[in-house]
Structures are given as C-alpha cells and as structure tokens.
Image: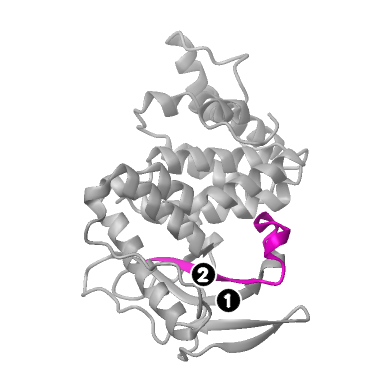
Amino acid sequence: MENRESMEDDLDCATEAFDQSTLSIKHQTKGTVQDIWQRPTRRPLPPANDVVLCFEIPLARILPSAAAPTDGPSSAGKKYVIYEVNVRKDGPGPDPYPTSVERRYTHFLRLYDGLRKDHPTLLQTVGFPKKVLMGNFTAALIGDRSAAFEGFLDHIVSVPLLRDSVHFLEFLQGDELRNACQLLDERRNELAVPLLENCFRLLNKIYLDKSKCVLLLLCRLVAACTTSPIPHPSAEQWAELALRRYEHVCDAELLVLYIPLLQTCLHLWWQRGRDRSLLEERLNEMGKKGIKVKGGPTLAQAIHALDPRAETI
C-alpha cells in the first residue's frame, strides 16, 4: 500500500472515543428522540509494527421510517436501525482520521446476496444475521448484528475477489455518489464536494492509491471542485493530488482522463495566478507524440464516459 500524502491528513478530522455502555440510550435531536446503541469497547489494536484495516460499528441509531422516503407510504410509523460503519487503518495507535458511512441492514443484506451469487464458495465460512420478526431494536440484537457485520466486512477485504467486486464498491460509495451526482446536476457543487471527499477518503483506505475506483473518484472530485464559476477552496489541493497520483499510471482506460485533468489544472492554475509551464510542457510532449491535446472532452465528460452517472455534463 502506497503512502498517503500529508494534504489528506489536513482535510480529515479525528473522531472522539465512544461511550462504554452497550445499552440503548435516549438522545434528543432536532425535537425528536432517538434510541442509540453504542459499542462497549473499541476493537483491539493490531500487534506492534502492524497496520490493519479495521471496520468497526461504534454506534447504531433507531429512526422512524419517515426519514427514509424510499420505503414508501406503507412503512409509515415503522422504525429502522442505521449503523455507523467506521473504517480505520490502525497501526501502533488508532487511526486518527477514521472515515464513516451510515448503512442499514438492507445494505448489508444486498451486499451479502450479491457476493453469494457471484462467489458462493468464498462465503461458506461467513455467518450473516437473519431477519427477525420481533425484537429488532433490542440492544442485544443490534450488538450481535454489529459484530457480525464487522466480521463480514473484515472477511471481504481479506479476499481480493470479494474486495474488488462491484457489490462491495456499491456498498462503500453507492448512496453517497448518487447523492453527490444529483447535487452536481442541480449545480450545488458546494454540497456535493464534501460527499465526494468522504467517499475518496474511505476508498483510499481500502484500495491502492492508483486503483481505478480511487483515481476515478479523485478525478470526479477535481471536476466537482472546478466546474463552478468560483473554484472550491480545496480545488488546488485535490488537483495537485490527482496529478501526483497520475504519475506512472499505465492503465489505458484511466489514461483517457489524464489530458482532461491536465487541461482542468491548467485553467485552475491560470485562475489562481500560478506558474503553468510544467503543465504546458506535459501537454506539448503528448502533442508531439501524436496525442490529441486540444478539443477533447472536458474532465466531467471523460468521467461520464467511463462511469455514467446522473450529473449533467
């Protein structure tokens, strides 16, 4: 696994340690009462000198179904549990910059069913919690399910075929990426960027720095930061990271993004009054090799060609 650039640390935030009680407690949020289950202890740290990818569910919240419009009107008055999935790279100490996403039982079940369909033999040793008709919201059941989900995710990342599957990638980023693309379609880039940043940090903990899903999301983030009339405050940082990541990339499919990325950075550097000579030199070298460097797709258009989404291009 390649080293992470220091700028990523600057953009992350550490999280606080969680309460030690396993019992459900009441929490007041925006005039409503939520039931919250909290993990009794943190998962143990790895042995000295080891770095381990760790999935931990530190808490779960019981919410009314009204907060989930996709469930339809028939679910009105019902409740569901949302699990906070914490992703860490623990070493001698806990990862100071964990990344979290919220997922429901149905997300885990969809992931399990997809993987079991494609790779049944690779899940023979994995137990998955069954649906129950009663007692869904007890602390004991939520605790058991959380432990099972943690073990399930640990197993996935330990098996390359499971880790690199479309089902796991959908689980990790699907909801957030769809929401971000919808916001981009509405020209609300300032709201889409934080979602994409969180997706990038999460994928960057699980996959290699130059893997396709990481570079694609990084380029999508650069595009989101630069398509507004006024670039996002983090635009230069993400653009610089993308340029560094693209050094020595050999994947032909991903290289179609490189010229649009260079053109985007060239325009951004011009907006910020920065020296553009190095970027111009790279483009000139490619032009001498017969590569088309002008009149091609924008970065957003090139991304859309590789991974069509909802955003307008």
Mark 2 and mark 1: Cα distance apart in space: 8 Å
Q: Which residues are magenta?
A: 68-88
Instruction: Give yes or no for residue 73 being in the magenta stretch.
Output: yes
Quadrant where the C terminus lies? top right
Residue that appears at 55% across and 16% down? 293
Q: Which mark is residue 148?
A: none
Q: Is residue 19 visible?
A: yes
From the viewer's perspective, is residue 49 above or below residue 204?
A: below
x and y percentages locating residue 152 in the rendered image: 33, 63
Task: Describe residue 47's horizontal placement relative to residue 248 as left or right.
Answer: left
Q: Is residue 245 above or below residue 296?
A: below
Report the residue at 42% width, 35% height from top.
246
The residue at which mark 2 appears reads as: 84
- Residue 269 percent coordinates (x, y): 63, 36
Query: Which residue is nearer to you in this view: 12 or 173?
Result: 173
Is residue 133 magenta-colored? no
Q: Does residue 277 appear in the picture of this structure?
A: no
Q: Nearer the viewer, residue 193 or 130?
A: 130
Q: Residues within 10 Å of mark 1 (few under 14, many from 20)?
A: many
The residue lying toward the viewer, choosing from 229 and 67, is 67
Render colour scheme:
one colour
**Which image quadrant for residue 272?**
top right
- Disc 2 marks a residue whose amino acid type is Glu
Label 2 vs 1, first from the N-terminus: 1
**Horizontal relation, residue 258 to residue 115: left or right:** right
Q: Position of residue 168 (x, y in %)?
A: 40, 50
- Pointers 2 and 1 in contact (C-beta within 8 Å): yes
Q: How many marks?
A: 2
Return the residue at label 1. Answer: 61
Image location of residue 75, percent across then percent down: 67, 64
Identity of the residue drawn at 70% across and 58% down: 69
Circle 2 crowding by C-alpha within 10 Å: few under 14, some 14–19, many from 20: some
